[in-house]
Image (cartoon, coloured by chain):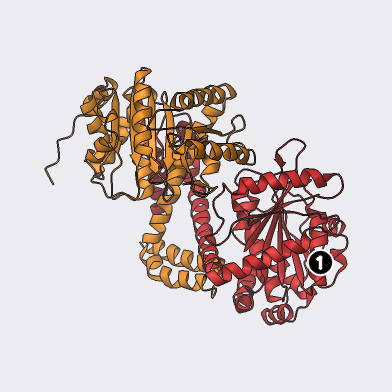
Chain colours: A red, B orange
């Protein structure tokens, strides 16, 4: 590894981000991603200062399994947003990825046109973090990008693990990309994801896929009638889109804007964001409590055996919980 | 309140439950529901002794919003199971209920025929507990009923709050009851519930409802194609049922049995139950950690202010978490 670049001052970071200096923004994100404790304190101080400048962007999550065409979609969708005068940031969450923390070479190839534009900003998430850690860094990166004046933040996640739930908890609008399958089922829709979607894009509705996409769309719309509303004032939409030809992408943006206006008018946007903040805080707290609990030597010593007894039906979970807490409390008093 | 009935000995509880003594079973459930600490210790000792005798029943959750016809359905379905030689227990979870802990008068009226049968056992959940507390008592009551030789445990929940998720986490099979709506939407299906269902029963498919039920069923089956599989080897089914005429109830039981055989053969039943036990333990642990954290005087003193800052966007959740943990840790060291 090369030697670490020296950090800027808090003032320099703040000024640079607010003045939309891309180099400083990139360094601020690196600061947020750092696991160094001094960096972490500086990062939190920076975020606290920038908070009043955040919250203005359209926060749009884009998810779909590998092969659904996310890269081509994001490249074309991003280019169209640029042509509407929007500044666009693409943040990628990929808990399964092993890409290096600093390199965006992969993303430059994936989004060939967008990555060359100076009003666009593409940033992958760092590897080697827990999914919770990646989500936290992505949220904070999103805030930095907002403070740097980006109008649209596209948060991309591959459809594995808990990615969609994490993204759904940080964005205003979640787009699920799917493919018309060979048979009569829609491909690439994971368990639970359909109910998180604000819109479903049936991608690759071009060329030979056109007919299948239209059939899938028709059935999908019928299916959506049976799903409860995503929000009291919003029912999920289904659209045919093509990352290749751009079909449906303008209509999709109109849906994002309509969603924004609807939720703003109903007061749900403010309520949703407040709730996202609150639940983020509580997930950090319970995560930390659980980590602390698991790390206690007495708990660690007994956990595997007790968990095995519980799983095998030899011990009830309440008895197991009591036993682990007894060990934990005794150890805590001694320390 | 009348004076509390004296408790039995551990041996007497165990023998009574194993010998299927209904009066002792009822007292054992009261013991499990008690908030007295001595009772709780006795209850856990009893459950630990009975554990080897549990796990044999068909655990079936039944959910649906008020008005969907759960009582009539359970009464008729229970009677049919009795006529097949099954012993049936009905446990009701109702987090919103204010019924008194001991009275089952309401349930005697609700399930008029079943409540008179001696091979059936109906028990409401105690009021005044947290949803988590009710779920815990219901799980433990289910174990007691299994040890008392009941073949089928029907766990009923009204479609409010987190009831379905709690039930889904303790049963093998979740039946969601719904109604054909006046328009083209199915009524009474809550957000997220469809994806938890192993089967959806379109109820009141009798008389004037017959035609609407059939249309709803047709559309629902199309919709189910778009939902991911409930389990790798099981795809949710949709059936027309009538609690009033009994139509579809034999077919429904066949589905429950087919589900059991399928999941047993694939090994998913054992894996699912093991996972239910593990996740029950962890939910008890994190619940207790969070309660402990919230109850700490320093945390309690600062929480409301910090949470308000987070929700209003004046403080980032990581900074808030650090501040609360600093208060918590300092207070813990002092105590």
**Residue B75 in which image quadrant:** top left
On the image, the x and y values in percent for residue B4 come to 14, 41
- Residue beneath the point at 20% across and 29% down: B9
Residue at the front extreme, as displayed: B208
Which of A294 and B30 lies nearest the eye of the viewer? Answer: B30
On the image, the x and y values in percent for residue B233 come to 61, 29
Give the chain letter at badge 1: A
In the rendered structure, the answer to whether residue B181 lies left or right of residue B244 reads right
| Residue A1 shows in the view | no
| Quadrant occupied by the C terminus of chain A | bottom left
On the image, the x and y values in percent for residue B70 come to 38, 38
| Quadrant occupied by the N terminus of chain A | bottom right
Rendered view: B77 above or below B208:
above
Which of B199 and A311 lies nearest the eye of the viewer? Answer: B199
| Residue A9 shows in the view | yes
**Residue A81 in which image quadrant:** bottom right
On the image, the x and y values in percent for residue A53 come to 64, 78
In the rendered structure, the answer to whether residue A208 lies left or right of residue B46 reads right
Rendered view: B299 above or below A64:
below
- Residue beneath the point at 86% across and 69% down: A117
**Element under disc 1:** helix
Give the residue at mark 1. Answer: A80
Residue at the left extreme, as displayed: B3
Which of B65 and A13 lies nearest the eye of the viewer? Answer: B65
In the rendered structure, the answer to whether residue B187 lies left or right of residue B124 reads right
């Amino acid at each position: 590894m090369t030697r670490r670049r020296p950090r800027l001052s808090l003032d320099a970071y703040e000024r640079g981000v607010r003045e939309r200096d891309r180099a400083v923004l990139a360094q601020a994100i690196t600061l947020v991603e750092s696991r160094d404790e001094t960096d972490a304190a500086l990062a939190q101080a920076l975020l606290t200062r920038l908070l009043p400048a955040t919250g203005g962007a359209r926060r749009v999550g884009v998810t779909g399994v590998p092969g659904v065409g996310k890269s081509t979609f994001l490249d074309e969708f991003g280019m169209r947003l640029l042509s509407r005068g929007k500044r666009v940031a693409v943040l990628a969450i990929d808990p399964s990825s092993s890409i290096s923390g600093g390199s965006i070479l992969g993303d430059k190839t994936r989004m060939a046109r967008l990555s060359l534009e100076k009003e666009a900003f593409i940033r992958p998430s760092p590897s080697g973090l827990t999914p919770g850690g990646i989500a936290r860094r992505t949220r904070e990166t999103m805030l930095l990008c907002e403070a740097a004046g980006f109008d649209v933040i596209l948060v991309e996640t591959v459809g594995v693990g808990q990615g969609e739930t994490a993204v759904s908890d940080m964005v205003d609008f979640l787009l699920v990309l799917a493919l018309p399958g060979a048979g009569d089922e829609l491909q690439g829709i994971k368990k639970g994801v359909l109910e998180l979607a604000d819109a479903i894009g049936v991608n690759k509705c071009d060329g030979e896929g056109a007919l299948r996409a239209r059939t899938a769309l028709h059935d999908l719309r019928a299916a959506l009638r049976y799903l409860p509303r995503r929000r009291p004032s919003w029912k999920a939409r289904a659209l045919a889109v093509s990352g290749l030809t751009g079909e449906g992408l303008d209509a999709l943006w109109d849906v994002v804007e309509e969603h924004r206006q609807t939720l703003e008018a109903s007061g749900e946007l403010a309520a949703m964001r407040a709730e996202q903040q609150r639940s983020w805080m509580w997930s950090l707290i319970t995560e930390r409590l659980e980590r602390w609990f698991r790390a206690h030597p007495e708990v660690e010593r007994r956990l595997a055996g007790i968990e095995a007894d519980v799983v095998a039906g030899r011990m009830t979970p309440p008895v197991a919980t009591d036993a682990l807490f007894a060990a934990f409390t005794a150890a805590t008093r001694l320390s």
